[in-house]
Amino acid sequence: MSAIGRVSERGTTSIVSGRQGAAALSLANSIRLQILKKGKDRLADQDLDQARAARADIAIRPEIADFYNCVLDKAEDRYSYGSYLAMDVLKPLLPTQGRIQTGRDLVSHLLHDLAEFERMTLENGGGDLLPHGRPSRQVALKRIRKAGDLRESTNPSNDVFDSMTGPVESILHFSVIPVSDQHDEYLFIRVLQCYETIFTMMAMLLEEAVMATGSGEVSDVTGRIESAATTLDRASGLFSLLATMPPANFRSFRLQTDGSSAIQSEAYKLVEIFCALPRKARIDSPAFLSVPRVRQRALSDPDSLASWYCRRQARWSDVERKMMTDALERLETSHQKWKRTHYSIAKSMIGSSGGTGGTEGVEYLRKRTEARLFWPIGEQCPHQGLVPEMRKQSH
């Protein structure tokens, strides 16, 4: 074949591939649009069959394949907290070890997208996307303002750009898959995705802190613990944003999320085991049984910040001991504040109803407010100057 012929053949292949890619994207957008009009749970069997067939195409873009996996989770008996939040779709944007800033960027993008969704509803009446339970103009403006404030507080050292690159925009585009047609489910999903990102960042910082214990330098360890506490503190306004959703709106779609619960969060459990190895009762509880990979890690008896403290604190100078104590107290206090606020929000939203992940619901959250991240300190080893909260036992 001549060079001209080979070029022509490549050109034809490129055109065909481009058309196939455009068709695949068009189908994914069509299914996404239907979900944003009526909710995933009301997709027709024909739509699910199309998604299943399209997913089998080896040339499909990763975010679209992951989108289809989440769309099909209930139909294929794979429904979970992760699939409800489309965390696999967001995975390329999640922080990785050594790249914590990407987590702050993702939170910023999620909040910007949420604000844009509320702004779109204000400007064109929302069209036919998630038509039920829309907020008043005053509440929508409040959400937009709060989202903007949160972007600044969670990502203060980095410029926040409203424009997004192609891959980032596409990933964000396919990462909201509500089960209902309730407007506020969009808010709910985005806030929970932010928290999953926050706890992923915290887990990585605390893992780095555990690894830094090998150097024996207290300042290397405390710096990372302080960063984890700061990360959680700066995101505290997320609950205030979520509180703009009327309880009745949440209850209208909550039952459709049965089988998905934050109890299934791997990132949150990793934060626990890096701080202190949980008691056997906790490791054998539904909370850890729902995250088998993290449970297996806990069963391997890994080192933790609490165990390192107990081994080393007698050798520290007064200055080192105070540095470490201050860092642990700050993270413990931040975590306790988060749990109490979480409990308060959940109580106002669902009252005494049971949980959607096989837990006791609000009662489970109430009991967990008594647990402490660094529970062995003060119980299994001597301590000096620790706040009362850190001297209590974990449950």
Image (spheres, grey):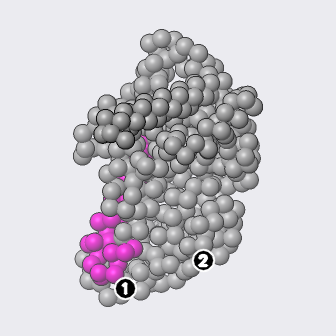
Residue 24 seen: yes
Q: Residues within 10 Å of mark 2 (few under 14, many from 20)?
A: few
Residue 186 seen: no
Q: Position of residue 91 (x, y in %)?
A: 47, 50
Q: Is residue 35 left or right of residue 105?
A: right
The answer to which image quadrant residue 49 occupies is: top right
Residue 213 falls within the magenta-colored stretch: yes
Residue at 73% over, 46% down: 76
The answer to which image quadrant residue 269 occupies is: bottom right
Closer to the chain start, of discs 1 and 2, is 2
- Name the residue tied to disc 2: 299
Placement of 127 over or under 59, stated as above or below: above
Residue at 32% over, 51% down: 101
Q: Secondary structure at mark 1?
A: helix
Question: Which region of the structure is painted magenta?
Answer: 210-237
The answer to which image quadrant residue 73 occupies is: top right
Residue at 35% over, 78% down: 213
Q: Foreground: 37 or 192?
A: 37
Q: Position of residue 78 (x, y in %)?
A: 69, 50
Amino acid residing under circle 2: Leu
Residue 240 falls within the magenta-colored stretch: no
Q: Which mark is residue 312?
A: 1
Q: Which mark is residue 19?
A: none
Q: How many marks?
A: 2
Q: Is residue 265 left or right of residue 387?
A: right
Q: Position of residue 200 (x, y in %)?
A: 45, 56
Q: Is residue 206 left or right of residue 358?
A: left
